[in-house]
Image (cartoon, rainbow, N blue to C red):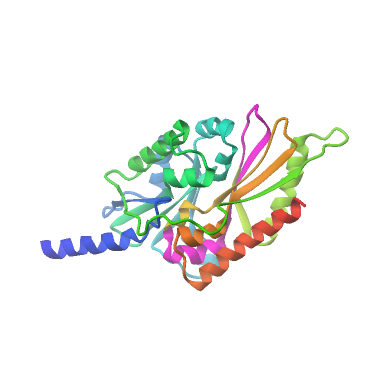
Amino acid sequence: MKKVSLIFTALFLIMAEGFASSSYNQVFSVDNADGKINAKSIEKAFNASGMHVDVNNNMNSIFEKRYKKVHHQSYNLAIFTNNALVTKLMKKYPSIGLITPLSMSIFSDDKKRINISTLSLQGMSRITQIPETDADLVKYAAMLDAALHKALPKGNYLTPKKSTKSSNTNLVTAFTTEFEPEDGETYIDLKDGFKEEFESEIAAVGFLVPKSYTLESTDYDFFDTYSIIRFNVIFPVSKNHPDAGSFAPFSLVIYKKKGDDTVHIEYPSIDNWINDLDITDEESLKEVKKTQGMMSGILEELTE
């Protein structure tokens, strides 16, 4: 029996390592044979660790209703953040908005283990171009690590299945425009009008906004971020890549620094998922490219 058990454990580790796509994202995993750990207990542990969870959706319930099938025994997508650290980071690096909020997937394919996928410190740094040595970013990653350990006691990080490779596409899709207040208008008024039009445009083509944030800082006229998801892309991608929750929902930032006429609108390029998650199936490739094209096209039109 011991030999059989060892063979099974080794087989599981080989299969599980496939969930950790690269060093940019990380999968934290633990035995859950007693079933005591679930998406709600993980949310509670994150909140207790200073990582506030704003949304924690059971995607299987959504997938079952929309597509009449699911890929995994359990699959949740959640978003979380620490407002104090984000506020400190945004004073130095507005690019922190590209990962505000952070996202995670919580998934299981049997009753014996549960997994959480998030961005790693390297992944956070890569998207934002904030140095991995920045004290506040290091603290953010350490706070995430503490939350993962609190949520999954005795858990461990799975080994990435492939080494990091460079992407042929831009890591960030960025647009700029200018707001020109008239007749008593403020920059906030114009930003709100832009957001209303943006929300209308993306909703019409199947994007949803689980949560948006307005962050206050004396350095900015405004600094807003969105958490955005499109079910038609995460559904096929998550079949073979449940760790896609490290990247989806994705965050979009819109900000204007005081004294600067330029308004910046940026989000992590969705087609980077292809390399980062090693996506090869045609359905997923089609939807990833389509999602990137739709979002880029809408913003290009709105910022002309």
Name the residue at 51% across, 64% down: 235
Name the residue at 70% across, 57% down: 298
The image quadrant that residue 110 belongs to is bottom left
For the residue pair 122 and 195, the one nearer the viewer reads as 122
**Whether residue 272 can be seen here:** yes
Q: How many marks?
A: 0
Q: Where's residue 32, x and y in %?
A: 29, 53
The question of residue 148 being in magenta is answered with: no
**With 12 as the anchor, is 258 left or right in this view?**
right
For the residue pair 294 and 74, the one nearer the viewer reads as 294
- Residue 1 vertical position relative to residue 250 in the rendered view, above or below: below
For the residue pair 287 and 296, the one nearer the viewer reads as 296
**With 296 as the anchor, is 6 left or right in this view?**
left
- Residue 166 vertical position relative to residue 140 in the rendered view, above or below: below
Q: Where's residue 180, x and y in %?
A: 82, 39
For the residue pair 115 and 275, the one nearer the viewer reads as 275
Region rendered in magenta: 213-242
- The single residue placed furthest to the right in the displayed view is 183
Q: Can you say which quadrant of the picture contains the N terminus?
A: bottom left
- The single residue placed furthest to the top in the displayed view is 218
